[in-house]
Amino acid sequence: MRIGITCYPTYGGSGVVATELGMELAVRGHDIHFISYAPPIRMDLANERIHFHEVEVASYPLIDHPPYTLALATKMLEVFESQSLDLLHVHYAIPHSVSALLARSMAAPRRLPFITTLHGTDITLVGANRSYLPITRFSIEQSDGVTTISHYLRQTTLKEFDIKRPIEVIPNFVNCDLYHRSTDSALRAQWAPGGEPILMHLSNFRPVKRLTDVVEIFALVREKMPAKLVLIGDGPDRGAAEFLVRKKCLQRDVHFLGKQDRVYEKLGLADLFLLPSQLESFGLAALEAMSCEVPVIASDVGGIPEVIEDGVDGYLIDPGDVADAARHAIEILSRSDRGRSMGLAARANARKKFCSNDVIPAYERYYKQVLDQSPAHS
Ligand code: GMT
């Protein structure tokens, strides 16, 4: 198949899922055309089946907010015509599904079906905003296919947006061959020269991630035992976290790595992963850690319980309950056999339920179903 994929190219789970999906599909023989304003993070052009088409947004002094949605729709049509695309797959409803809807209308009577994958904040935060709700609902209803990355998000979308059409759940996935335990002892020694256990967090440091709770949890652990904290990512809450680290005099124990490529090389060195978010529709970073045999302490919210089994792969806590999280962290870290057995269970569950070898074919089947069913639009 020839598939156009649109996503945000920035540091965020939806862009990561879209890019990894495109790369896995290319390995399976599909031609993939990424369409966005910048190359998506993690995109690797080494595979000759991967292509990138940049959306250029012209500006003019009169226009304070250049209309990206329109430029994107035009580029989608252009790529459809030049590459004979079979379908478009857009990740994150706003504004990508609206652009795809416009592209499909412009392409008529030729057939350009589009699938929208909802990731979370496009529904729970951005889409539920009064300014965006009606158009988000409309573009979801109009999509030829709609998927969500968890059952929780499917239920929320149906309820909050009063959607009547079918929605398919295709969960996020991890490449279990790439994400595994790491043996890079030099890097481990650099972070934890005394052999201390390593706690890790990876995100875009937005308020919903509760990054300062990560530091609070670590501070409580650190009161009881030597340990190190490795923070991967960047975003609006980095300043607050750095301030808290200084206030608690933990500068020597906390490493801010900033945005990183090849996160699998780092995740596989952790002894515990923390994801104490206010809300997560899935929690992709937690799954990636699990595949690397890392137990996870995460919030009991949204789609997280579909990924992490409390007491098996790690522990689920109430958002904001840093004392409970620290208690579980100390229990896991103070007995290495506990952490190891939970880590092995985490990897077994990641392989059983979310391995890319199983999830990518589910997308392929869904593409075929949509292509077989979608009418020619006028
Ligand atoms: O969590 C973010 O801030 C980024 C956001 C995104 O769309 O880029 O993540 C959402 O999509 C990820 C990939 O499907 C999910 O793993 C995250 O749980 C989800 N975030 C939220 O629901 C807050």
Image (spheres, rainbow, N blue to C red):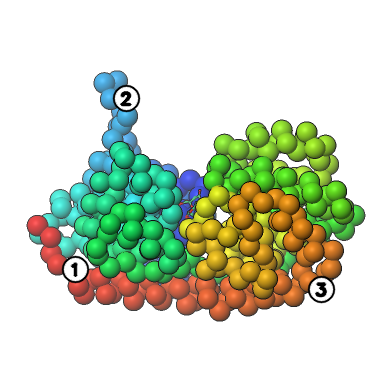
> In the image, residue 123 lies at what x, y percent?
38, 51
Which amino acid type corresponds to the residue marked 1 in the rendered image?
A: Ser
> Is residue 378 something that shows in the picture?
yes
As measured in the structure, the alpha-carbon distance from the residue carrying label 1 to the one carrying label 2 is: 38 Å
Task: Reply above or below: 188 against 314.
Answer: above
Q: Earlier in the sequence, mark 3 or mark 2?
A: 2
Q: In this view, does 3 lie to the left or right of 356?
A: left
Q: Which residue is drawn at 45% across and 73% down?
A: 359
Q: In this view, does 135 lie to the left or right of 272?
A: left
Secondary structure under the numbered disc 2 in the rendered image: loop
Q: Where is residue 295 in the image (x, y as percent from the top left)?
A: 69, 66
The kind of secondary structure element at disc 1 is: loop
Q: Which residue was labeled with disc 1? A: 374
Badge 2, how many Cα within 10 Å: few under 14, some, many 20+? few
Crowd class of label 1 (few under 14; some 14 to 19; many from 20; radius 10 Å): some
Which residue was labeled with disc 2? 64
Q: Residue 337 carries which label?
A: 3
Earlier sequence position, callout 1 versus callout 2: 2
Q: Position of residue 226 (x, y in %)?
A: 87, 53
